[in-house]
Image (tube, rainbow, N blue to C red):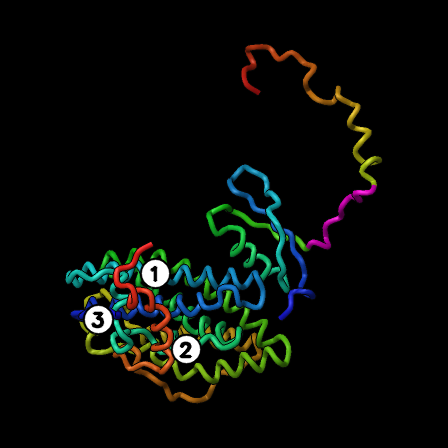
Amino acid sequence: MTTQNIQLWEVFIRSRNGLAHKHVGSLHAVDATLALQAARDIYTRRGEGLSIWVVPSNAIVASDPAEKGMMFEPAMSKIYRHPTFYDVPDEVGHM
Amino acid sequence: MTVASIKVTESPLVLYVLRRADDALILGHRLSEWCGHAPMMEEDMALANMGLDLIGQARELYTYAAKVEDAGNDEDKYAYLRDVRQYRNLLLVEQPNGDFARTIVRQFFYSAFADLYWRAMMKSKDETLAAIAAKSEKESAYHLRHTSEWMIRLGDGTDESHRRAQTAIDDLWAFTGELFHADQSDAGLISAGVATDPESLRDRWIDTVSNVLSVATLKRPASDWMQKGGRTGNHTEHLGHLLSELQSMQRTFPGATW
């Protein structure tokens, strides 16, 4: 068997209740059921997870690295969008 | 230099526990032989994971057998210092890996039994065995699920995968009868509620196997002729080769640690 023609899946693991699923890597599997099992076998061997999502890699729409100027640079100069211009009253404590 | 085999006093409970421990160790060792050789990396990990589950079960069972026997033996001595005629595992689990389909079929036959067996053993009157069963049951349930999915994909996959899966089923079928065999030594443990009567699991095992084979478009062999002997140390020619590798270090360098 060769893995060349086997579909690629992205794996997301939620490590604890209340946290978001986080991308941990990818794997090859012939279908969704085996992808979920492979994710369990590869990415949760050390007790990393309580929940697994697998998503076909080709279902992900990605930004084009060549367009990063247009996509991301305009935000660089908008430092006022960072919430660092407010005085937080002492009574609020740690935010 | 080689080191002599240990002597084991096989009271019914020691023998019973050693038989299950040997099943787990030998099958776990077989799976470990795939490490680095599986058809794809994902399955390499899956097979190694199952192997580690089984070796973990073996360790707990050997440790318990050592405690019951109380003769100075331990898990390492049982594993490394018994010769082939002292091993008590099922013939099924010592059969060679063959191709991927054969490994999956062997694991499927065993796991379909182990899933039922450990679930039943959670009610054992022996507290240690019940505790080992509770842990092992979750592992076996996953092994059954994983191998069932592969049975279906191999059987209902390509002509070649179907042929390989069916050949493995036909070749290994005769080793499945031993799963349900209990002998005189087991009888007292079964009547005392320490052990489950394996015969009581047969119908459900047949159901599980038949259902998966049917979805997989594979055929259950018609033959009812069954091979046995592993429980009394009469093994196929394959176990000696396996043990020579498994035991080579301790036989050559007795007591070596690292």
Q: Are marks 2 and 1 on the same chain?
A: yes
**Element marked by disc 1:** helix
- The kind of residue on which mark 2 rests is Gln
**Element marked by disc 2:** loop
Decide whether residue B239 is among the magenta residues.
no
On screen, residue A71 versus residue B77, left or right, reads right
Q: From the viewer's perspective, is the residue at label 3 or at label 2 nearer?
A: 3
Q: Residue at x 46, y 71 (%)?
A: B108
Q: Nearer the viewer, residue A15 or B36?
A: B36
- The kind of residue on which mark 1 rests is Gln
Q: What residue is shown with label 1?
A: B57
Q: CA distance from mark 2 to mark 1?
A: 20 Å
**Element marked by disc 3:** loop
Find residue B95 and name its label: 2
Q: Position of residue B214 (x, y in %)?
A: 54, 77
Question: Disc 2 or 1, which lies upstream in sequence?
Answer: 1
Find residue B72 and name its label: none
Compared to residue B98, the image places residue B35 above or below, namely above
**Chain assignment, label 3:** B
**Chain assignment, label 1:** B
Q: What residue is shown with label 3?
A: B4
Part of the protein shown in magenta:
A57-66
What is the quadrant of the N terminus of chain B in the image? bottom left
